[in-house]
Amino acid sequence: MLTEINFDGIVGPSHNYAGLSLGNLASARNFGRVSAPRAAALQGLAKMRANLERGLPQGFFLPQRRPDEGWLRRLGTDMEAASAVLRANAMSASSMWAANAATVSPAPDTADGRCHLTAANLVTMPHRSHEWRETLAQLRLAFASQDHFVVYPPVPAPFGDEGAANHMRLCAGHGSPGVEVFVYGVAGGAFPARQHREASEAVARIHGLAGERTVFARQSDEAIAAGAFHNDVVAVANERVLFTHELAFAERDRFYAELREKLPEVEIVEVPAAEVSLADAIASYLFNAQLVTLPSGEMALVLPSEARETPSVWRWLEAHVAGNGPVRHLFVHDLRESMANGGGPACLRLRVVADPATIDPRFMASADKLDLVEALVSRLWPERIAVEDLADPALWRACVEARTALCIELGLSELNRAEF
């Protein structure tokens, strides 16, 4: 049976605050801070466990090998000789944010009735641009059944594609045909627009999506300039509900009208700027929550603790739940390590609508499997990493050894190849 599965990225042992992501205000603000990779991974695993206990199917992706020595070799250098900037880019643990892994079109939407996944190229940011090779390897393992899935390499550069963070799907139910919304940017003042319309259109064509069930919406320049580097910082969708900030989209009224024409049952829940400013929405990651449907049929938001700590945001949420809005439950999680680098609950997961029985079980979570991963993380993940530690060969070895042990523990030793 088709259901929505959230695949979370396990936070890697090299998680650090090198401030590499231009336009990501949290990343810039926390540059140079001492990170806590062990705590970061355990926080993410706790969220996965809680969602499992809520009756939500849960999968995961493994951290990528860091340092990425293959990438450095392609640049004619290595960890010993590389500049501090290249070394930091080779050590980034940013693949933890699985929302950027790929764009996913479920089987009910596609011409051939299979689920289509295209790995994101992430070309705008150097530290993320080399993720796609190993992302593609994991996608091809997890979704290997050619009867049910088609997995594609990235759209070619220079067309920037940041994956599901700029893609939403609205539908009557996860197993029903949906309307897929591709959100692209054009300008953002000092910050780059990371998702190109050309990339979005290419993915829609590759996935075999019908024009009458596809919408291309432009992210507002104001949102990008305020630090909404991905659409999922200012909007999120689930089944028939679009939950969005008033200032998320350019030509908002036209976008809403097109959406209502293609999916009449859509319910648009718009948070007014007068009640929650863009600044508060972005700082709290209100819209980077996971909007999910519980087994009861009720919808819930899985939120970072920063949302509860932002008065305007929590006031709006409590009023919404107290009224007759579609969101009936608020679940709050401590994800401070990920949040400090600019990634909330929704950044950490890739949504895939599929039958769990068609997926490689090694990528599916269970309570027992999470116990094993937590024990290994508690034993092998570094407790702290300062930016200057990125030059330490002992840290490089520790990160490789920790990740290698995790692959072995989960029966995915084929991911220990030195290079992809």
Image (tube, rainbow, N blue to C red):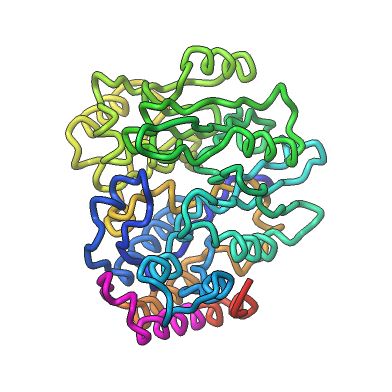
The region drawn magenta spans 383-405
Res. 25 in view: yes
Res. 411 in view: no
Query: Is the C terminus in the top left, top right, bottom left or bottom right quadrant?
Result: bottom right
The image quadrant that residue 168 belongs to is: top right
Task: Please say whether residue 25 is one of the residues in the magenta stretch.
Answer: no
Residue in the picture at 45% in, 64% down: 10
Q: What secondary structure prevails in the magenta region?
A: helix
Residue in the picture at 49% in, 30% down: 186
Vertical comparison of 136 with 320: above or below: below
Residue in the picture at 62% in, 63% down: 133
Q: Is residue 120 left or right of residue 63?
A: right
Q: Nearer the viewer, residue 296 or 194?
A: 194
Vertical comparison of 411 with 111: above or below: below
| Residue 55 x/y as whole percent | 49, 51
The image quadrant that residue 171 belongs to is: top right
The image quadrant that residue 220 belongs to is: top left
